[in-house]
Amino acid sequence: MNKPAMRNALKKLRKVGFDRADRANALMAPQEMLDFLAMTAGVKPVFLLGRGFNDPDWIAGVVQIAKEMQLRIIVGPPWQAAVSDVPQWFRELTHPEDRSVADVVYICKAKGAAEAVANSCDKKSISMEEEAQLLAYPECCVRDHYRRVELRDQAFFMMVERTSGGNHEEMRRIIRDDVGVAAETDQEKAMLEESHGAKPALFTSFHMCDQCRGNPDSPAKRISARFEELAKAIGSDFASEIASSQGGL
Ligand SMILES: [Zn+2]
């Protein structure tokens, strides 16, 4: 691990401007910086830029740093490793982020990782196993993430369908006009609650599956510990800053 190089990169990342009035982004920034540094240290094959934290100034600033560091930059569609049972037209209306294709930036250090990303972009497909490996996330937690997204999508579909009496035009209007719909049936309530139940793995950007959460020596906890160690090696202030930001999310 080249600590001076990582500290130098951290200094540059800290200088990147973005809209700090967006509280969620401001709280995510320290973890994003750790993820970037983990990629430069070879701990994380791919750093994913522009998904979730999509401030344009931040994206442009990080791309510039990656160019200066001669990292490999690939722009392509966001990964979507799961096939949803929710109708395609409904999914497209409720997941506009999936349509803004060229907006995700994959940054890698190793040639092999960059080739895997380029391949996934060409094929427009990726397996959950490969997504997990490239992001240094546990496969079980990646699978669980997709399961919860699907549950939330299905619950929302049921709620909108019930509210509209099954009329597709009315369903479209409810989504377009952002009409509030609430869970009413026991099934809808249970699905929504389950979809929101994941807890973040500290010092990482993924959420833990239930098995990982309940086991002190789970894949998620081990990755969490590795990233905490990396943050502390870069600087104890940096590690504390990440911990307190994650507490605020
Ligand atoms: Zn897990």
Image: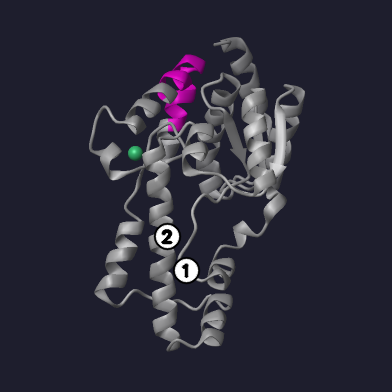
Q: Nearer the viewer, residue 192 or 115?
A: 115
Q: Residues within 10 Å of mark 1 (few under 14, many from 20)?
A: some
Marks 2 and 1 sit apart, C-alpha to C-alpha, by 8 Å
Is 90 above or below relative to 218? below
Rendered position, 238 above or below 205:
above
Residue type highlighted by circle 2? Glu
For disc 2, the neighbor class at 10 Å (few under 14, some 14 to 19, many from 20) is some
In the rendering, which numbered label is found on residue 150? 2
Q: Residue at x 63, y 25 (%)?
A: 112
Counting from the top left corner in percent of width and height, residue 208 is at 35, 41
Q: Residue at x 63, y 48 (%)?
A: 54
Q: Secondary structure at mark 1?
A: loop
Q: Which residues are magenta?
A: 228-242
Residue 197 image offset from top left, x and y in percent? 31, 53
Q: Is residue 6 above or below residue 211?
A: above
Relative placement, left or right, of 6 versus 197 is right
In which of the image's four quarters is ligand 1 placed? top left
Task: Name the quadrant containing residue 206.
Answer: top left
- Dividing the picture into quadrants, the one containing residue 213 is top left
Does 107 sit left or right of 67 as displayed? left
